[in-house]
Structure formats: structure tokens, C-alpha cells
């Protein structure tokens, strides 16, 4: 993300130089920059509201959910019984009690 930020900053500076090179006023440059900032902030809020979550528990197959998070999710109704059973299976596999196919060692 740092590279995207630096690239977009350079892109904005390029347009500022183009406006200045074509004889645009400083007010025109400021207006352009503030419009770009506003559009960027709007997209930032859209991305934040739509895609950012508290955690990726129960979504990533390689992550084992802590017990307290699992209990909270069950109480709040965010997970199904099958999700809880799958979490117990992952815990057993990671603890060495069974292999990946589910056979007891």
C-alpha cells in the first residue's frame, strides 16, 4: 500500500505541474488538489465500510480462532454449528491429535 500511496502522490504532483505549466492560477491548483483529496476520502470510507472487518476469523482456513472469540461469535449468532465443529477439527489437527484427513493418530 505504501507504493500505491507514493504513486498516487506523484500522480497528483504531476497534474499540479501541468496546471502550473499551462498558466493556471494557484487557486486552480488548490481547488484541484482539494477535489482530489475529497474524492480519495470518499473512496476510503467506501472501502472501509464495505470490506474492513474486525477480524478474519472463521474466514481463513489456516487460522485457529481463540476460545473467547468463538464463544462471543456463537452468542451473537455470527457463526453456525458447522463453523464451530470445523474449528475444533483444526485445533485437533494443529495439536497433533489427528491428521489432516481426520484419522486419530
Image: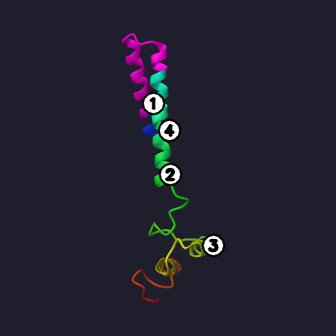
Q: Residues within 10 Å of mark 2 (few under 14, many from 20)?
A: few
Please state the horizontal and vertical placement of residue 39, each as a whole percent of the image: 45, 35
Count of numbered tags: 4
Magenta stretch, residue numbers: 7-30
Say which label, 3 or 2, has the lower sequence index.
2
Say which label, 2 or 4, has the lower sequence index.
4
Residue 36 tag number = 1
21 to the left or right of 55: left
Residue 82 tag number = none
Q: Whole-Å distance between the Cαs marked 3 and 2?
A: 25 Å
Please state the horizontal and vertical placement of residue 43, each as a whole percent of the image: 45, 42
Residue 68 tag number = 3
Q: Which residue is mark 2?
A: 49
Secondary structure beneath label 3: helix
Q: Whole-Å distance between the Cαs marked 2 and 4?
A: 12 Å
- Do tag 3 and tag 4 residues touch (Cβ < 8 Å)? no
In this rendering, the answer to whether 69 lies above or below 97 is above
Q: Residue at x 46, y 67 (%)?
A: 59
Work out whether residue 95 or residue 74 is closer to the camera in this orientation and state it: 74
Please state the horizontal and vertical placement of residue 62, each as a whole percent of the image: 46, 69
Q: Which residue is mark 4?
A: 41
Amino acid at each position: 500500500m505504501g507504493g500505491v500511496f507514493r504513486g498516487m502522490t506523484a500522480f497528483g504532483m504531476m497534474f499540479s505541474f501541468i496546471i502550473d505549466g499551462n498558466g493556471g492560477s494557484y487557486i486552480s491548483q488548490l481547488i484541484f488538489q482539494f477535489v482530489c483529496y475529497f474524492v480519495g476520502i470518499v473512496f476510503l470510507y467506501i472501502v472501509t465500510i464495505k470490506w474492513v472487518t474486525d477480524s478474519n476469523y472463521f474466514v481463513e482456513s489456516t487460522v485457529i480462532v481463540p476460545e473467547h472469540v468463538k464463544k462471543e461469535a456463537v452468542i451473537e449468532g455470527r457463526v453456525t454449528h458447522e463453523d464451530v465443529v470445523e474449528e475444533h477439527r483444526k485445533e485437533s489437527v494443529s495439536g497433533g491429535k489427528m491428521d489432516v484427513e481426520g484419522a486419530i493418530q
